[in-house]
Amino acid sequence: MKKSVVDMVVAGLVLCGLAACTPVVGDKCQYNSQCGSTLTCDTSVVDGYCLKAGCRQGECPAEATCVDFGTDTSYCMRTCAPDDECRDGFTCRAAVECSGDASLAVDSGHPCSWEAKSFCGIKP
């Protein structure tokens, strides 16, 4: 009986360890496979950036916001408040709230967030 309890504890620890390794929006990456099954690796930035392409309002994971960059380009990007919440090489960028015509915000030089949240991105 003790052996089965030990086996269960070990299995639980292994599962917890695996859950901690689940990729989230904003993680470093080199390949899409490093971002899990629902995210993509943007290799155009230093050390890569796990994100979800083609998002709409309310479709991003809890740690992210849907940012519209215009021309039908939107991504789930990691949310932030102060700069120290973004990983090295990124800054916390303010995003105006998207309206019915998200392109207006983008035309003014600022991406917009449907959730009106700041996001970790490269410096403009």
Image: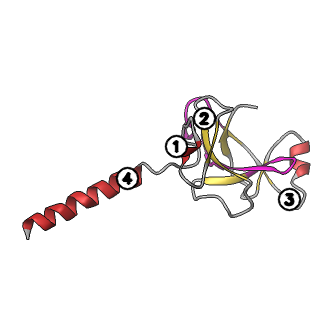
Secondary structure found at label 4: helix
Please tell me in which quadrant of the rendered image residue 13 appears. Answer: bottom left
Cα gap from disc 2 to disc 4, whole angstroms: 22 Å
Cα gap from disc 4 to disc 3, whole angstroms: 39 Å
Magenta residues? 67-91
| Residues under numbered marks 1 and 2 in contact, where contact means CB atoms less than 8 Å apart | yes
Residue at the left extreme of this rendering: 2
| Amino acid type indicated by mark 4 | Leu
In this rendering, position of residue 44 left or right of residue 28: right
Secondary structure found at label 2: loop
Residue 79, percent across and down?
A: 62, 49
Cα gap from disc 2 to disc 3, whole angstroms: 29 Å
How would you rate the neighbour count of disc 4 (Cα within 10 Å): few for under 14, some for 14-19, many for 20 or more?
Answer: few
Q: Which mark is residue 48?
A: 2
Along the line of sight, the residue nearer the viewer: 36 or 98: 36
| Residues under numbered marks 4 and 3 in contact, where contact means CB atoms less than 8 Å apart | no
Q: Which mark is residue 34?
A: 1
Along the line of sight, the residue nearer the viewer: 52 or 33: 33
Query: Magenta stretch: residue 75 in it?
Result: yes
Q: Which residue is mark 3?
A: 99
Q: In front of the other: label 1 or label 2?
A: 1
